[in-house]
Image (cartoon, rainbow, N blue to C red):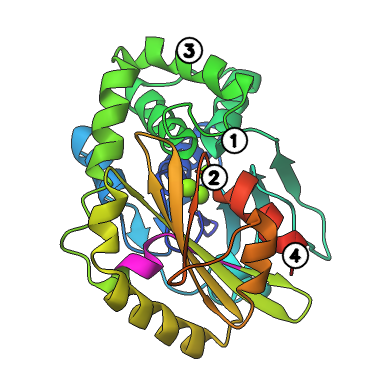
Amino acid sequence: MEKEIVIFGHKNPDTDSICSSIVMADLENKLGNHCIPTRIGKINKETQFVLDYLKLEAPKMIDKAEDRQEVILVDHNEATQSIDNIENAKIVKVIDHHTMNFKAPYQLYYRTEPVGCTATVLYKLYKENNIEMTREIAILCLSAIISDTLLFKSPTCTEDDVKVANALQKIANIDMQEYGLEMLKAGTDLGDFSEEELVNLDAKAFEKGDTKFVIAQVNTVSIEDVLKRQKDLESAINSEIEKRGIQLFVFAITDILNSNSEIIALGNRTDAVEKAFDVKLENNRAFLPGVVSRKKQLLPDIDKNM
Ligand code: MG
Ligand code: MG
Ligand code: MG
């Protein structure tokens, strides 16, 4: 039998990365391809809520791609966010919704749409292939959309995401507002994470020329609660800066109920943050009203000022 194709989302996986890996494997297998969902990092509490709700096991953890291993990337395309040794794997498909920073010296299937979530694209692929979705798959997709769009409140949320979520809600037969809020709240329980874990929980690395920077994000229902740990968070951030050799680390604490973020920014390029948001960092911090999206709000403005 041919070797199975391995599917995974980005490092520090979020709900979209995990759910979309499982969903994509389901679709591919139904289309007759031999695929397994995997993950390249720890399951966060929000995603665990989804898996528990469906009584599903987490996808298998892998830490490195084998040489010439066939892989499918979901919910990312940048090598810096992908599995170790990705440069020696063979990427056969990419299903994504992020800015494209990707190059391969061979042909492949690449599907990206300017929508709020990978699962929105996956729903369309089921339709296009005339494959029926089970309730379980619908709930996985719906969870991913709710997570990525913060229950449709993020500026990344598009009309397509809302339309697809409404269709999924019918298949899933659940109240998505009620389910979604419970799921998001499960992800804000940060109490038993160390500061080192917190700053890495949802951290993404970016490069602009020779400049390397990281934007990390945690969701909360109380920014104040998280800020009680500012001193220890800063030590954890500073050791990441040293370890990764980066010029800037932005840690965004996002209030999911009021749709605002407080950021802690450290490194020798915090000037890019001050310019990006026209703020003066005080005590390494700034409050950014209405900012909830790394992809649409934090990253583009910081990147422009790098
Ligand atoms: Mg993601
Ligand atoms: Mg996503
Ligand atoms: Mg996210």
Residue 293 tag number: 2
Can you identify the residue that label 3 sits on?
A: 167
Of tags 1 and 3, the one toward the viewer is 1
Q: Amino acid at mark 1?
A: Thr
Q: Is residue 144 left or right of residue 246?
A: left
Mark 1, secondary structure of its residue = loop
- Mark sitting earlier along the chain (4/2): 2
Which quarter of the picture shows residue 225? Answer: bottom left
CA distance separating discs 2 and 1:
7 Å
- Mark sitting earlier along the chain (1/3): 1
Q: Is residue 210 left or right of residue 217?
A: right
Q: Is residue 299 magenta?
A: no
- Mark sitting earlier along the chain (4/3): 3
Q: Amino acid at mark 4?
A: Asn
Mark 4, secondary structure of its residue = loop
Using the image as rendered, state which of residue 228 and residue 122 is in the foreground: 228
Q: Amino acid at mark 2?
A: Ser
Residue 156 tag number: 1
Image location of residue 103, percent across then percent down: 79, 62
Which stretch did the figure color magenta?
Answer: 198-205
Mark 2, secondary structure of its residue = loop
Q: Is residue 202 magenta?
A: yes
Residue 305 tag number: 4
